[in-house]
Image (cartoon, rainbow, N blue to C red):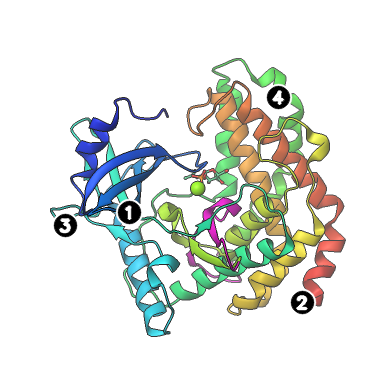
Amino acid sequence: MSVPAGGSFKFHEVVRRFRAWGDFVEAVPYGAGHINDTFKVTFNMAGAPVHYLLQRINHHIFKDPRAVMDNIVRVTNHVRAKLAADGTRDVTRHSLCVVFTRDAQPCHQDAEGNWWRMYLFVEGARTFDTIETERQAFEAARAYARFQNLLADLPAPRLHETIPNFHNTPMRLEALQASIADDVCNRAVETRAEIAFVERRANQCGRLLERHARGEIPERITHNDTKLNNVMLDDTTGEGVCVVDLDTVMPGLALYDFGDMVRSATAAAPEDTRDLSKVRMRLEMFEHIARGYLSEARFLNPAEREELVFSGRLITLMIGMRFLTDYLQGDIYFKTRRPGQNLDRCRVQFRMVESMEAQQDAMERVVALL
Ligand code: GN1
Ligand code: MG
């Protein structure tokens, strides 16, 4: 999806719907998300600059933006109330805060049918696309575990499934197979190696859901998009301050979250690099992810602990399958900036899977020692 057309006048029209105080100054594209359009917005509030985060929700993917916002308001209110009760300082830096519209709605639909929402901008913290230090790995994982912990007692009703079957790996496999059969862009021929890679691992796709169906792995409230750049680390202390990108917070398996941390935070190279020689799972980062996660995720049962290492491989395989499916379908889901980018992303994921397979025993040893 492209950046919305029109200059600041259009943003001006959108932002004035929200309860943001002061005079609108500018909106600049922000972040590296593949789905929504995100802007850092500046207001001049009686002489002081104040920032907000403005997002256009991709309603082709999140088909019910009101349900998304209903989840997010419940989740963020719950987290904020618990942090305040614990005496946390700067609560509004530690959980996203929805800025409501002037008519008290959590989002605004414009005349063209686009859905917009606004958050307070978390100052003094940033995200990383590739991890640089072991401390960052530890802090990012700890922040996600804390987030799961804080949501463990969210009162009923069950959260909406904003994207049904989001992490259903067997269904993702079926979608890939359908895209190979349709081959609408004639791209299957150049992805033969990747298709074969998936076929050799097809029997692994159902493992976590089968254990869930047998009652061994419970449903929990999970984030479902725990890539490294969805957690903000404090510029000064390096601590994980705020978990962002809450569109897919919904019922899920804790292992999906751990697996996606392993995928994104142990990667030695960017998610779409073409230099596959640089792609590998960094064992030292895995150790710090596992340490950070387990320091807070004390709720895990033995079956979940058993699958920690496997979950990294599974989520990485599945996200690679999703990039491959999108490539075969003509790049209609993930934003791309260049031709072939989804195939490059897929190849990186599969190289990561191989690297995890090669280091499986070492990864298991790391977990066993914690
Ligand atoms: C998307 O929005 P973003 O960039 O954080 C995707 C995730 C993928 C990720 C891969 C709603 O996340 O599932 O893991 O790209 N989000 C959605 O980088 O599909
Ligand atoms: Mg994101």
Q: Residue at x 32, y 69 (%)?
A: 77
- Of the two numbered discs 3 and 2 in the rendering, the one whose residue sits closer to the viewer: 3
Looking at the image, residue 297 sits to the left or right of residue 117; the answer is right
Whether residues under marks 1 and 2 lie with C-beta atoms below 8 angstroms apart, the answer is no
Q: Residue at x 61, y 15 (%)?
A: 186
Task: Look at the numbered disc 3 and give the secondary structure of its residue.
Answer: loop
Residue farthest top in this picture: 186
Q: Which mark is residue 155?
A: none
Q: Residues within 10 Å of mark 2 (few under 14, many from 20)?
A: few
Query: Which stretch is magenta?
Result: 213-237
Q: Which mark is residue 104?
A: 3
Q: Amino acid at mark 4?
A: Thr
The residue carrying mark 4 is: 191
Q: Is mark 2 within 8 Å of ligand 1?
A: no
Q: Amino acid at mark 2?
A: Leu
Task: Look at the numbered disc 2 and give the secondary structure of its residue.
Answer: loop
Task: Look at the numbered disc 4 and give the secondary structure of its residue.
Answer: helix
Whether residues under marks 1 and 3 lie with C-beta atoms below 8 angstroms apart, the answer is no
Give the CA separation, mark 1 to mark 4: 48 Å
Q: Which mark is residue 50?
A: 1
Towards the viewer: 131 or 299 = 131
Give the CA separation, mark 1 to mark 3: 21 Å
The residue carrying mark 2 is: 370
> Is 63 above or below relative to 144?
above
